[in-house]
Amino acid sequence: MSRVVRCGLIQASNALGANHPLPKIKKAMIDKHLKLIEQAARKKVKILCLQELFYGPYFCAEQDVRWYDLTERVPEGPTIKLMQKVAAKHRMVMVVSVYEKEMPGLYFNTAAVIDADGKYLGKYRKHHIPHVHPGFWEKFYFTPGDLGYPVFQTKYARVGVYICYDRHFPEGARILGLNGAEIVFNPSATVAGLSEHLWELEQPAHAVANGYFVGAINRVGREKPWNIGEFYGKSYFCNPRGRIIAQASRHKDEVVVADLDLEMIDEVRRVWQFFRDRRPETYAPLTTQTGRAAAAD
């Protein structure tokens, strides 16, 4: 018997230039996303993920303390409270990526998971923080995540989250599988010329290696005044066989929808017994910085 869950991803361009007041920027992006969420609801989406830091531009293109004022508490802040109401209205599970303030001077790149009744289930904090030229100065803004790799039992499926740069690291992707994820969402912000050739390689590989579905999001457009490159969209879902089954366009705001048959996970794992055949006792070098700890003298 199939367990089909209709899932959605929202990719969107920035609504206002970065020179506007931050409350105006934030409101414009939230208003834009509320319309796209309504569109997803009309398509009968049951689990929906928003893009990385959805309520603003990708401000990590510069290093300016001004952007610290976009932080808010999770789940007590206004954005998560609003999205809890939206989730309950549509009976929709939501993954919502925000700039979290734990306390003054301690900020995280965080995704909150909200169940279909509006209940806050918990959060994932991005672990791997890049500092990459050009214009990905994230260590200026984010502390590395400290909450592990949780998987959330929602009304419709067991959901895990990996955020943007995390996707380059297979270790956390494996842990999400071991923790029982059926769908892993990766809200991202990445530009052409830097990672586009990897975009359709790494996450299908995670899906295959771990036998789960992946939903990968990228924003769209060029963001002024920085113009670090084109956010090329192409958000997609792939299945546990690594096949992309639904994908957005490159240039426009879009809601990507796919019906995911979660029974495929069992079907694939009956053939590819990667979890059975793991050799964790041989992986000690993975927990050292150089990988040489277990090497013979």
Image: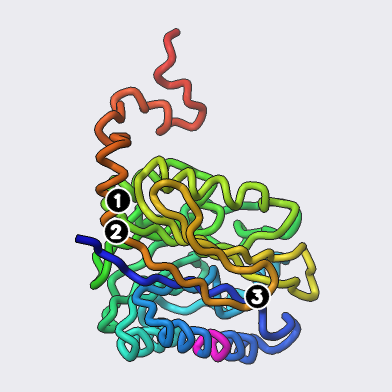
Tag shown at residue 265: 1
Judged by depth in the image, the label closer to the viewer, 1 or 3, is: 1
The residue at 61%/76% (across/down) is 12
Separation of marks 1 and 3 at Cα, in angstroms: 36 Å
Image vertical order of residue 209 relative to residue 77, above or below: above
Question: What stretch of residues is rendered in magenta?
Answer: 30-34
Judged by depth in the image, the label closer to the viewer, 2 or 3, is: 2
- Identify the mark nearer the N-term, 2 or 3: 3
Observer-nearest residue: 84 or 237? 237
Is 33 part of what is drawn in magenta? yes
Which SS does the magenta portion mostly show?
A: helix
Residue of label 3:
57
Residue of label 2:
262
Disc 1 crowd, CA 10 A, few/some/many (<14, 14-19, 20+): some
Tag shown at residue 16: none
Observer-nearest residue: 167 or 22? 167
Kind of residue at disc 2: Leu
Whether pointer 1 and pointer 2 mark residues with C-beta atoms closer than 8 Å, the reply is yes
Image vertical order of residue 121 relative to residue 30, above or below: above
Image vertical order of residue 25 relative to residue 243, above or below: below
